[in-house]
Amino acid sequence: MNQSRRQLLRLSAALPMAALGADPDWPGFRGRLGVGVADGFALPTAWNADASTGKPAGIRWKSPVPGLGHSSPIIVDNRVYLCSAVRKAAGKAPLKVAVGGEPTAADDNDEQNWVVLSYDAQSGKELWRQTARSAKPRATRHEKATHANTTLATDGKNLVAFFGSEGLYCYDLKGKLLWSTDLGVINISKYGIGWGYGSSPTIHGNRIALLCDDPANPFLVVLNLADGNEVWRVSRKGICERSWGTPYIHATASAVQVVTNGWPWSVSYDLETGKERWRIGGGGDNPIPTPFAANGWIYLTNAHGGKAPVYAIRPDAKGDLTPSDTNKNEGLVWAANGAGSYIATPVVYGDHIYLGNTNGVLRCLHAKTGEKLYEQRLSPDAQIYASVVAADGKVFIPSLDGDVYVVKAGPNFELLARNHMGEPCFATPAVLKSTIYFRTTDNLVAVG
């Protein structure tokens, strides 16, 4: 590839969603460029997918999903793709939905089929399913997690599925296996429990980035998309004890970097070499949200202990950005302590950043200053584990209480609707034009 072509690709990858125009696909976790935003089409505000609460309304279709998984749907070429783990034993896999969580592993270590599924985006018809692996899990999972937490990624031709300890698989869009590779056991353990792998693959050009922060052997690896061969690997020993966030790839004309959430350090690496560009500390000890970019900055947050910060970082930052009385690194634009989210990745929409929390609180900050504008509990029953997405002047917030809350975008809290899904929503929704796709615990639901 010549230099001008390479620079063009880097620049296009750095553009905001609205500037990308014609491509409406949702090709990975949180969609195009991982921003969680899909403007340009009208989306519904109110609907009902739960027949037990009245006549369903506003639902295009509902299709059953086998097994159990928190894998979020992705969309390419009018096909919806997701992953699931189907236990071979009789009965449903156990899943804790109640408020709170203890350091408890699920009793779900019998033989599983890890499957990749394809659905028609217009009708909901299942088109194909492929079993990537059939075996007993090589690591346990938390009682609120699953054996298929990760979201697929695609470049429009290849479909990449990573199940952590159960391997990496690359398919074409018709379900043909192109290659696979085993990265070994990746046991994201805390309190002696393998809590389940949760970091999705990220594709940029002919590269796949995977974050594998097993406390015993944490590493970041970049592979060749064409054949799965390893390009480079860097150890994160002493940098990160554990994390679940998806690596974010940020491209400009001058550099491409892989940004990783972590504890005690969140770190950016050069995509070509694996060399560290910058790092920042002071966050929570269970780093789960995925970094992303908006307004020309990189946003990063985590919680669960520490200062629960939100950081806005310049893409050309270098060195240690950790804020202190003596460290005034200009690469850090602003920091807002006590405002971060624990599990859900926030979304920047216009001038505001919206953060959902497991206690059902939605927090809104000014995205350019970090000033807190409001903090509002959606309902006494709400639990926000899925990442929020934004479109059509609205913020969509799935919850474990079986509802999706729709809030008007802006500096003042206004709840537009509370829509019944009938089942908990752990997965982040996907948006295609005028339809929003939700994965609940049992179904894939198209609303629009």
Image: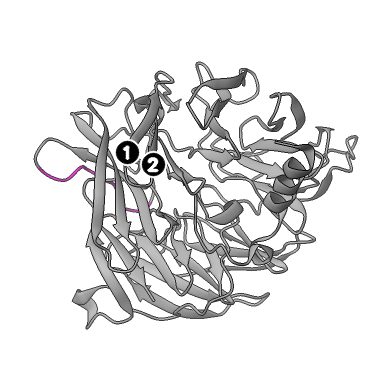
Residue at x 72% of width, y 38% of height: 256
Q: Would residue 336 be visible to someone looking at this image? A: no
Which of the pair 203/371 is nearer the observer? 203
* Three-letter amino acid code at the position of disc 1: Lys
Q: Which quarter of the picture shows residue 106?
A: top left
Residue 427 forms part of the magenta stretch: no
Question: Which residues, given as a range, are shown in magenta?
Answer: 91-99
Q: How far apart are labels 2 and 1 at the CA level?
A: 5 Å
Q: Look at the image and tell me in which quarter the C terminus lies.
A: bottom left
Q: Secondary structure at mark 2?
A: strand
Q: Secondary structure at mark 1?
A: loop
Residue at x 52% of width, y 16% of height: 217
Q: Is 88 situated left or right of 27 in this image?
A: left
Which of the pair 227/399 is nearer the observer? 227
**How many C-alpha atoms fall within 10 Å of the one at disc 2: few (<14), some, or many (≥20)?**
some
**Where is residue 160 shown, x and y percent of the image?**
43, 38
**Where is residue 73 shown, x and y percent of the image?**
40, 54
Which of the pair 134/380 is nearer the observer? 134
* Three-letter amino acid code at the position of disc 2: Asp
Q: Residue 309, relative to residue 32: is it above or below?
A: above
Q: Are marks 2 and 1 in contact (CB under 8 Å)?
A: yes
Residue at x 73% of width, y 24% of height: 275
Residue at x 25% of width, y 54% of height: 127
Residue underneath mark 2: 172
Q: Residue 176 bears which disc, if any?
A: 1
Furthest residue toward front? 2
